[in-house]
Amino acid sequence: MKKLLLILAVVSISGCANIMEMIPSRWDVNQAKVTTDLRQSTHNFDCKGDQLAQLKVIAKQVEWFDLYAESKGTKDVAKLTATMKGTITEFQNRPQPVSAIYCDLKKKLMSQQADIIAKTVQGRF
């Protein structure tokens, strides 16, 4: 009987963990602020300026968001930045200088990705 109760307890606990991953995390002022900062940085990206320095700022904002989400345990929003990290890394690794068209396309892409992240993060209750 004790073994049965132990097995039921283990199954219940592991089942609750899976359910908890399906429940969205709550709104957080710090995450909301950094997503707004990220939007501002990407929307004001200047292709005629020092692109690598600007990319470094954006990468640090994304890193801050990831570290904070990991520390806080908000796994649902921690997954949001994966695509944007790839875009930033690809841009940083590109031989410099890049063409104006390439920079403009990447700027638009980063802006769209930052918008999606911000709307998702700030759309929580």
Image (cartoon, rainbow, N blue to C red):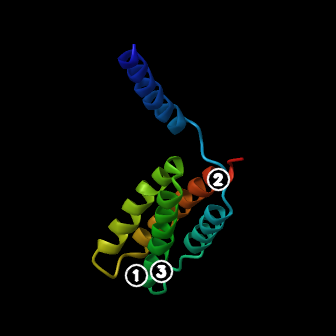
State the separation of the CA atoms marked 2 and 3: 22 Å
- Which residue is disc 1 drawn over? 52
Left or right, residue 63 beside residue 25: left
Q: Which residue type does callout 1 highlight? A: Leu
Q: Which residue type does callout 2 highlight? A: Lys
| 10 Å crowding of disc 3: few (<14), some (14-19), many (20+) | some
Q: Which residue is most to the right? A: 125
Q: Nearer the viewer, mark 2 or mark 3?
A: 2
Are circles 3 and 1 on residues that touch, CB within 8 Å? yes
Left or right, residue 1 beside residue 16: left
Which residue sits at x=60%, y=64%? 35
On screen, residue 97 above or below 33:
below
x and y percentages locating residue 78 in the rendered image: 48, 54
Q: Which residue type does callout 3 highlight? A: Gln
- Which residue is disc 2 drawn over? 119
Note whether residue 109 is visible. Answer: no
Which residue sits at x=47%, y=25%? 12
Please, what secondary structure does the residue beneath circle 3 have?
A: helix
Left or right, residue 120 beside residue 58: right
Please name whichever residue, 22 or 113, is drawn nearer the observer in this view of the structure. Answer: 22
| 10 Å crowding of disc 1: few (<14), some (14-19), many (20+) | some
- Which residue is disc 3 drawn over? 54
The quarter of the picture where the N terminus appears is top left
| 10 Å crowding of disc 2: few (<14), some (14-19), many (20+) | few
On screen, residue 111 above or below 5:
below
Which residue sits at x=47%, y=35%? 17
Q: Earlier in the sequence, mark 2 or mark 1?
A: 1
x and y percentages locating residue 53 in the rendered image: 44, 84
On screen, residue 80 above or below 110:
above
